[in-house]
Amino acid sequence: MEWVDKYGPENEPSDEEIAAFIDSPLWEKINSFLQDSYDIKPAKAYSGCSGQPGWNIKYKKAGRSLCVLYPLSGSFIVLVVIGAKEYEEALEILPECTQYTQELFERTDAVMGGRWLMMHITSEEVLEDAKRFIQARRKIK
């Protein structure tokens, strides 16, 4: 049974079920980073969006989105929106990022005032890139 079929809008998966589905130590790392660094708790939401339908995990601070996490089998996606406020800093960060992230940034068109980076997290290096962009959205105090 497909993940989206098993966990439809009326059947919210538990944190444990999400972690088991993703089955990656990077999942715990991103959640710990976000919760510890920003003193925030995640909120689950169901999306019917055709881009990535199903349950996702949203992180917001002071009413502003930091990122959204989308579970995949064996990995996950981190959505970080690079808006006008973060754009110059993102350009400064970019040369330090992996080739994957640099290419993703270049091929992602600006939409609704920002670049919506859907970063497929499959390695520690790409996870670090995602953290850099999240920190461009909001600094850690």
Image (cartoon, rainbow, N blue to C red):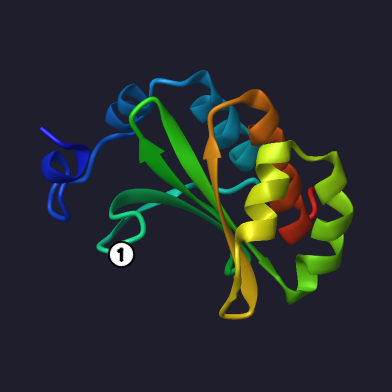
Q: Secondary structure at mark 1?
A: loop
Quarter of the image that includes the N terminus: top left
For the residue pair 10 and 91, the one nearer the viewer reads as 91
Three-letter amino acid code at disc 1?
Answer: Cys
The number of numbered discs placed on residues in the rendered structure image is 1
Point out residue 137 in the picture as x, y percentages from the top left corner.
72, 60
For the residue pair 97 and 130, the one nearer the viewer reads as 97
For the residue pair 134 and 38, the one nearer the viewer reads as 134
Q: Residue at horizontal 48%, vertical 43%?
A: 77
Q: Residue placed farthest to the right in the image?
A: 92
Q: Residue placed farthest to the bottom in the image?
A: 112
Point out residue 67 in the picture as x, y percentages from the top left corner.
56, 54
The answer to which quarter of the image holds residue 97 is top right
Point out residue 111 in the picture as x, y percentages from the top left corner.
56, 76
Q: Is residue 50 left or right of residue 30?
A: left
Q: Alpha-carbon neighbours of circle 1 within 10 Å: few (<14), some, or many (≥20)?
A: few
Q: Residue at horizontal 68%, vertical 44%?
A: 101
Point out residue 133 in the picture as x, y percentages from the top left corner.
72, 51
**Residue 18 visible here:** yes
Q: Residue at horizontal 80%, vertical 54%?
A: 139
Q: Is residue 5 above or below residue 73?
A: below
Q: Residue at horizontal 32%, vertical 32%?
A: 18
The answer to which quarter of the image holds residue 90 is bottom right
**Residue 141 visible here:** no
Residue tagged by mark 1?
A: 49
Q: Is residue 74 above or below residue 13?
A: above
